[in-house]
Structure formats: C-alpha cells, structure tokens
Image (cartoon, rainbow, N blue to C red):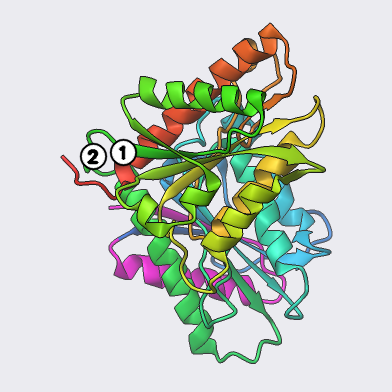
Amino acid sequence: MTRLLLVYHSRTGTHRRLAEWAARSAERRGAEVRVRQVPALPGDAVGDAGIPVAELDDLRWAQAVIFGSPTHFGSPTATFKRFLDSTSPLWLNNELRRLVVGAMSSSRSRRGGRDSTVLTIQRSVLHWGATVVTGFRSPSNELSPYGVSVSLQAAAPEPAVVGAVDAFVESVISVAADLNGVRRVRCPTIALVADAVDADLAGLADVVAAAVAADGASVVRLGTEAACDPDRLTGIDAVAVGATVRVGLPDVRVVAMLQEWGGSGKKGPLAGMPATGFVLTTAEEDGAEAGVLALYTSLMHAGAVIVPSGRPDEPVLGGAGNPYGTSLAGGASTASWAAAHTEAADHMRRLVRVAGRLGRSEAV
C-alpha cells in the first residue's frame, strides 16, 4: 500500500478541494493517505478546520507527496514556501531522496504564473533528490506537462479538473508503488544521448557511461539525431541527456531533439521513463544549474520522470556539486574532473536504481 501525503496552502478553498479530490482518487487506488495544510504565518487567515497541520514526521512517513499552492507573482505563497524551507533538517540527513513528488498550482487567470509556481516547487524538491513526476499534454488545460494547474476563472467544467487530478494522482502513485515494490529489471538499459561536438563533453559522457556501467546497467550511446527516431528508444529503460550550455540553455542540437520528443501535443516518447541530464559549460558559474533545469523542463514535455542528482556529498565535493545534475566546466582542473567522477557515480547510481524499478524491460 503506497503512503501518499497531500500538503497544501489554500486561501480561497481551491487547494483544499484539489487535495480532497486527490485523496479520494488515491484511496480508490488502495493508497493510505494523509491530508495536511501548511502551518500558518502571522497575519494569515484562519486555516481549514479539521485539517491537521503538516509536520516533518509526515514527510518521514510518506512514500509520495503531492504539494499544492496558489500562485503569488509566479511563485508559491510565502506560507507554503516557509514549510518547504523548514524541511532543511531532513534534507541535511538525506531523508528526502526516496520520495516521489508532484505539484499542483492555481491562479486567478489562465496565464497567471501557474506553470512557474509548479516549476518553483519542483526546483526545491530537486534539491532533495526526490523523483519528480510530471503531467502530460492533454485536451484539458488543467493537466500541463509539469503538473496540475487550475485557473479559478477557467471555462473548463469541474469534471475536467477532477479528471486532471485523478490522472495525475494515478501517475504519482504508480511511480511510488513501483519504486517501493519488488519488481526489478535485472540489467536496465540506459540511453546516453550526447553529441561528441566538444572534447570535454565527450569526456564527461565517458565518465557518465562508466558510472552507469559500474552500477550494473547496460549503456546505449546515441547522438541527438539518432535519438529523434522513436524506434531507437525501444527497449530503453532510462535516458541521460548530455549538452553543452551556452547562455544558460542547452545547445541547438539538443534543443532540436527535445522539440522532436515533446512537441507533438500528446504523450511523449519518454512517458513514464526516468530521465536525467548532465552538462558542460564554458566556465565556472556560467549557467550549469540553469542548463540542467532547462533540460528538465523540456524532458517533462516528453513525459519523463525526472531523476536529479540531489544533495551533493559536501565533504567529498567540497560544496561544488550541482544539486540538479552532473556538471563540469570546460578546461577543468584535475580536481574538478575528480569531483565530476564522484558526482556522476552518485547521480547515475540513483538513475540506475530508479530505472531498475520503473524500466520497460522484462522484470526478474
């Protein structure tokens, strides 16, 4: 039985209703559910009567979490963000990496910053190292490529919103059940997608490939042009995409591939597949984090389940690790290459583990 935690902040009742719909959907699927509201800040309106306040022990109990917050200037509310900030003790103890997380948002208008709010919540849980379940494109505007996002003035009838929540809950519970179940793929196959356009990127791809192989997985190396062919993804259990980053964005070859994967308006070829990213920048502090996040945003359009590197091992990496994905600067020192090896080993160990539970290959 999957343990699902629903944590929300609601100012007008929208997110309480979303949480209630999500709870009913999860319970129909046999999940054990806790519904919690975030603690109020001074000056907040009185919270929802009868709904317990979220505590850190709720996160320790959960296997999956769905967060919900209204949009305030394109971000979650301060009240909601305060709860996320309070999770630092669990993050420091590496207790949150095992979680599967999704997010819901709402705004007063259809273009009111809903996507930005979901992505901001996701960015926080990527620091945890949590596995992030996203939405997918559908005729309902309430289920975006990133998660559930609702307009308070939406023309869509209530059943469309309930249906979007139901589909999202099904995805979150399915991933959490598989990650915590007994199913295993004996030797998952990881597609490592990167063009050898730069010697340092090719070297970083070699590091990533070695880390994948060291954890008992098979590696299939593809260029971006070959990866556009959906047949080349047959039998693949997870994807690691490598890119050079310029001005905070992946290079044009990778962008073209991502557009091919996620531009159809339907479920993408990576639907339900674990995916992650690694990047090379021209210099230190030159957009490595932004580049990985841009990769993830596009991979969500293809339906991927995002597997970040999570909290870097500070004593080993000296604080230089990228919490989102493995990264390296061009012309890096020997010490930086050594740190990249360590970071890639930890990052790919997580990807292989998730691929072994969610992979499409025949299970043992």
- Residue 138, percent from left and from top: 51, 77
Q: Which mark is residue 240?
A: none
Quadrant assignment for the C terminus: top left
Image: 157 above or below 229? below
Q: List the residue tagged with mark 1.
A: 356
Q: Which residues are magenta?
A: 1-30
- Contact, mark 1 vs mark 2 (Cβ under 8 Å): yes
Residue 103 visible (yes or no): no
- Residue 335, percent from left and from top: 68, 8
The residue shown at (82%, 54%) is: 42
The residue shown at (28%, 62%) is: 30
How far apart are the alpha carbons under marks 1 and 2? 5 Å
Between discs 1 and 2, the one toward the N terminus: 2
- Residue 279 in which image quadrant: top right
- Residue 151 in which image quadrant: bottom right
Is residue 199 shown left or right of residue 71? Answer: left
Is residue 215 shown left or right of residue 208? Answer: left
Residue 359 visible (yes or no): yes
Q: Which mark is residue 184?
A: 2
